[in-house]
Image (tube, helix red, strand yellow):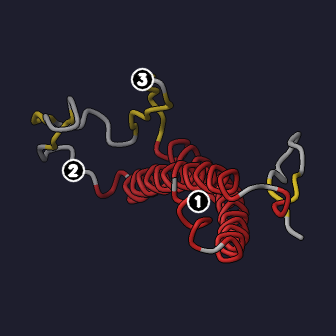
Amino acid sequence: MSSAGGGRGQETVSLDSLSAQQLSAVKKQLDEEVEHLTASFQQLAAAQAKFKECLRIVKSGPASFDDKKDILVPLTNSLYVKGKLSNPDKVIVDVGTGFYVEKDTKSASDFYQEKVKDLAANIADLELIVQGKTNNLRVVEEVLRQKVLAAGPAGAAAAQS
């Protein structure tokens, strides 16, 4: 029938050979993996949205920046101070792990486009993994349900513990 553990470097085991208690443990592990992978998926999507917003702002270009107008400069996530642009053709880009680089708007746009593209590829890969784990989870749940039904009331109590 179906098998669990089809990942790389893992041994394949027939689900029919597992007890209801073992299937419950496999189900619990798959539930946790799917939950973790879904959270990672959401974090990647949020990061991609932030990069898209940065790209939109940088692409709006120096023409949209008025060097005579005050801007808000973020010091932390919730603290901003007034400031003025010294050079609207240059931007400061967070390249990761707390490092910032001054770039012209064209290279900053290229940087953000590459980040959005990389994250899109990672999101697509992760989506396939989540779908595979979810399918495995459904198979395990179905086999567990069949075993519990076959065992009768005593098997239902054992599977829930």
Above or below residue 32? Residue 98 is above
- Say left or right for 149 vs 80: right
The residue tagged with tag 1: helix, strand or loop? helix
Count of all numbered marks drawn on residues in the image = 3
Q: Which mark is residue 37?
A: none
- Say left or right for 21 vs 61: right
Q: Which residue is mark 2?
A: 66
Who comes first in sequence, dot 3 or dot 2? 2
Which image quarter is the N terminus in? bottom right
Badges 1 and 3: C-beta atoms under 8 Å apart?
Answer: no
Above or below residue 12? Residue 133 is below
Badges 3 and 2: C-beta atoms under 8 Å apart?
Answer: no
The residue tagged with tag 3: helix, strand or loop? loop
Q: Give the amino acid type for the residue marked by disc 2 in the picture.
A: Asp
Q: Which residue is mark 3?
A: 98
Q: Give the amino acid type for the residue marked by disc 1 in the picture.
A: Ala
Q: Which residue is mark 1?
A: 159
Viewer-nearest residue: 98 or 13: 13
Q: Give the amino acid type for the residue marked by disc 3 in the picture.
A: Gly
Residue 87, position as x, y percentages in the image = 31, 36
Residue 92, position as x, y percentages in the image = 39, 33
Residue 154, position as x, y percentages in the image = 59, 66
